[in-house]
Amino acid sequence: MSRPHDPPRGFFPFGNPFRLLSPKSSALSPWLLSLLNGFELALAERFKKLIPKNKDDILTLSWMKLAMESLCETHSNITTLITDLQLPVSDWEEKWVDVYLDISVKLLDLCNAFSSELTRLNQGDLYLKCVLHGLQSGSGEKYLQARSSLDSWRQHVNASNARIETCREVLDCLAKSLSLPRVKNSAKGKVLMRAFYGVKVQTVYICSVFTAAWSDSTEDLFDLHVTEKPLWAKVFTDMQSVVNGEIRDMLSLGRSTILKELESVDASVEKLYPMIQDGVDAVEVETFKDCVMELGIQAEKLSRGLDQLLEEVDSFFKMTLSGRDILLCNLRSSDLISVSAELEKM
């Protein structure tokens, strides 16, 4: 990763929770191998889709939306895999459940932070609407108000978000457990651990890219070193190299923002501001109108893109929350069954 961490622990630091679920042999049967390969090949395809033909597409809102959609699909797939493996929650050890719930809480924290930043950026659209309304009126007083609104918009979008600043600590905590654990006595456990490893790598990496996009800092961008065993390992490494390289190149140029649609709006504002400040000559009237129109187009693209990405983040939040609820519900049901069985024996 981009900075030193404590030595990584396994996903389950207290040992293998599946040691009692199957006979000692953990060799994968053709059926289990098929389940694992299907999951890993699907994940590899998702990583491949995140390598754009044009590097300029990286950190566009449409690319970020694709990344979040990809994350939702993977988390949905792991739920399906658990069902296919026929691993009832009642057979899970209590410590593993505690870790799962702790990780899901961290994911919910990240979703809340991302949603708050998307909402904050979208609130800046109100300033831009005031600007466009004022500039289309042609009144000198409105021009002064438009300039004031542009100043307010700049201050608003450049302000820091305390929630985004806390994402680094959350991601550091998740990254410390990024290692492929050894599972000796359970073939099903081995499949699940390999699958969970892929889920965690994708989750930590994509969330680190989002955090870096909003903090404009390479310190929040992770370089994850993954084991070569999974079928998705090579394409992930290729994708990470392309995306991280482009982000670092953008930040090295000293850009005010690396979010592409936000940068386009900022460029339009830069063109308009001196015209509003110094007045528009007769010769510049058409140029001025074009600039106003361009700002309107770019502002609309930004607002629409932020809305769409926010929807995907909300979907991921609901999926994570639903997963917690289902797990807790199943645990309560299994506890009731256990209590009933004990009472029958009495």
Image (cartoon, rainbow, N blue to C red):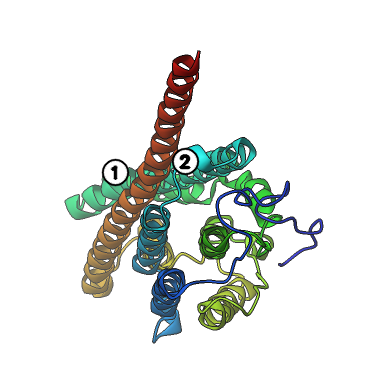
Q: Which mark is residue 141?
A: 1
Residue at the image point whose x is 48% and y is 25% from the top:
338
Q: Of all residues shown, which one is farthest toward the front?
A: 345
**Left-right relation of 23 to 260:** right
Tell me which amino acid carries mark 1: Glu
In which quarter of the view is residue 233 placed? Answer: bottom right
Between residues 65 and 315, which one lies in front from this camera angle? 315
Q: Earlier in the sequence, mark 1 or mark 2?
A: 2
Q: Position of residue 8 (x, y in %)?
A: 76, 59
Tell me which amino acid carries mark 2: Val
Q: Position of residue 154 (x, y in %)?
A: 47, 51
Q: What residue sits right under mark 2 in the picture?
A: 89
Q: Position of residue 60 (x, y in %)?
A: 40, 68
Q: Of helix, strand and loop, which one carries label 2? A: helix
**Mark 1 to mark 2: distance in Å?**
67 Å
Between residues 256 and 112, which one lies in front from this camera angle? 112
